[in-house]
Image (tube, helix red, strand yellow):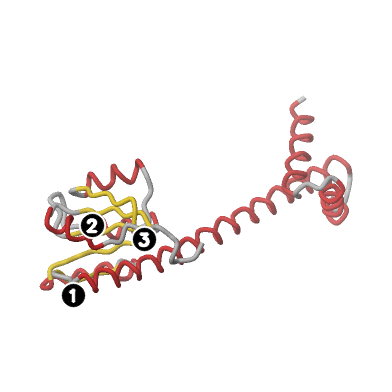
Amino acid sequence: MSLREQVYSVLIVSDSQKFNSSLTSALPEKKYGPIKVVPGVGACKRELLERSYDIVIINTPLPDDYGSRLAIDLASDIGLGVLIFVKSENFSAVYDQVTEYGVLTVSKPANGQMVLQSMLLLCATRERLRRMEKKTASIEEKMEEIRLTNRAKWALIDNLGMNEAEAHKYIEKQAMDRCMPKKRIAEEIIEKYDRREKQ
């Protein structure tokens, strides 16, 4: 799916009806949806427990906190695209505080062009994070396969007197002959010899 076709879910954290209605009307429906608005930090955290979002927009100050801590937490812990709107007099301080966590800061009032450009930057950021998440998951799967294969090799060495090269070759041959992933073969070997030890 190309970036043009991708639709991004948006959570707006804001207590201002005027801000909420102008922002939601500025976001094209073909690109952003669903769009949900919550009034503060507590409501935001509850909403994120219910469902995930691609982008979170925070309009400071919030009734239960300023909002910069929430922005930092969301950007660093969850990996969302986070945009924070701040009054111009607070821009430098907030920018210095949140930028290292990848939070995009925009000074209020912001015109529609600035908002749309910021949203496009967040979409690009979200895609980069998505690719990193896939890469991380792939690396974790590979490491799990290596761990299981090593355990299976040791089970073969201990129980059948094979050396490491023979055990490795055995697992690979079984995987090829049976058209199964090495991970599954390793799991079967571990299960077989674990069962024997328990008897």
Q: Nearer the viewer, residue 191 or 177?
A: 177
Q: Is residue 187 above or below residue 82?
A: above
Amino acid found under the numbered disc labelled 1: Ser
- Which residue: 86% across, 54% down? 169
Which of the image's four quarters has the C terminus? top right
User: On residue 24, which mark appears?
Assistant: 2
Residue projecting furthest to the top: 199
Q: What kind of element bears circle 3?
A: loop
How far separated are the C-alphas under marks 1 and 2? 26 Å
- For disc 2, the neighbor class at 10 Å (few under 14, some 14 to 19, many from 20) is some
Amino acid found under the numbered disc labelled 3: Lys
How far separated are the C-alphas under marks 3 and 1? 30 Å
Q: Is residue 26 above or below residue 17?
A: below
Q: Quadrant of residue 62?
A: bottom left
Residue 135's x, y, as percent?
A: 56, 61
Q: Nearer the viewer, residue 162 or 72?
A: 72
**Number of on-image labels:** 3
User: On residue 92, which mark appears?
Assistant: 1
Mark 1 in CB contact with mark 2 (< 8 angstroms) = no
Q: What kind of element bears circle 1?
A: helix
Residue 150's x, y, as percent?
A: 74, 51
Residue 179's x, y, as percent?
A: 81, 48
Image position of 16 (left or right of 52): left
Q: Earlier in the sequence, mark 3 or mark 2?
A: 2
Task: Residue under label 3, please give it.
Answer: 31
